Image (cartoon, rainbow, N blue to C red):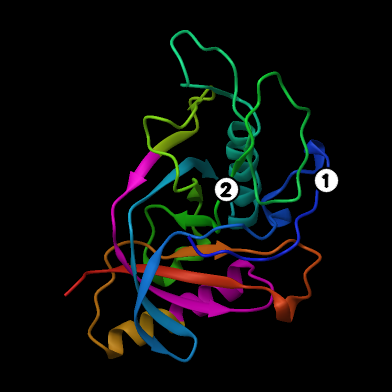
Amino acid sequence: MKTINLAMAAVTAIGLTFSEAAMAIEEPRYDIIEKSENIEIRQYRPFIVAETLVEGKMDEASNAGFRLIAGYIFGNNLSVKGPGDQTSEKIAMTAPVTVQPAASFEKIAMTAPVTIEPQNVQDAKAMQASRWRVHFVMPAEYSLATLPRPRNAAVNLREVPGKRYAALTFSGLAGDEKAQQKTGELLSWLQARTLVPAAPPQLARYDPPWTLPFFRRNEILIEIAAP
């Protein structure tokens, strides 16, 4: 995992939103296959995500999805450490949040980014979707067998196999209009190189809201077919 040395902060659980996500300690492992200015072709290694499906506009869905998965991370789960174990594990989220601790919590570092992916929509209007998949990447030290189980049925754990992605990095605010613009730029770049998208685009955000816009890191990620 790549280490990001960035500060972390906290807010109350009532104020928990996706837009308040802080920088992560780790990122999923990948190798850079090609780089062209602010675009990279990356080969990602397998990783596990906690994810949920939500309805609404992008920002609304981001907030709702963030709350659901953060609930899992901060204790709405069942440990799998031993037979009959009904305790919870606390997975330390990389966002500025604080929740009331529960008994027998185990603090586990989490990875970045927090990602939102449109569902059942054409890439040309991806960021105008009404249904979204929001996911957090889980720490590499865990497997599906060792991660605590979500108590909320709306949260699922899934292993993502190694895939190849095109990633366009940009700064500033990552609202739906800008995200759609950057998605179009990346799709055009892929088309010019006869690279075929294999899945809908994803928007990945890395920074807390107090980060100055020109210091923020956002990415559009599009899975592509490996040669």
- The answer to if 165 sits in the magenta stretch is yes
Q: For the residue marked with disc 1, what is the amino acid?
A: Val
Magenta segment, which residues? 158-184
Q: CA distance from mark 2 to mark 1?
A: 17 Å
Q: For the residue marked with disc 2, what is the amino acid?
A: Met
Q: Residues within 10 Å of mark 2 (few under 14, many from 20)?
A: many
- The percent coordinates of residue 169 (x first, y second) are 53, 78
Residue 157 or 189: which is nearer the viewer? Answer: 157
- As drawn, which residue projects farthest toward the top? 84
Tag nearer the camera, 2 or 1:
2
State the mark number for residue 11.
Answer: 1
Q: Which residue is mark 2?
A: 110
Q: Residue at x 57, y 64 (%)?
A: 3
- The percent coordinates of residue 38 (x first, y second) are 49, 86
Query: Which quarter of the figure is the C terminus placed in?
Result: bottom left
- The answer to if 27 sits in the magenta stretch is no
Residue 93 or 192: which is nearer the viewer? Answer: 93
Q: Residue at x 37, y 79 (%)?
A: 187
- Relative to 110, say whether 23 is above or below: below
Q: In the visual, does 166 lie left or right of 149?
A: left
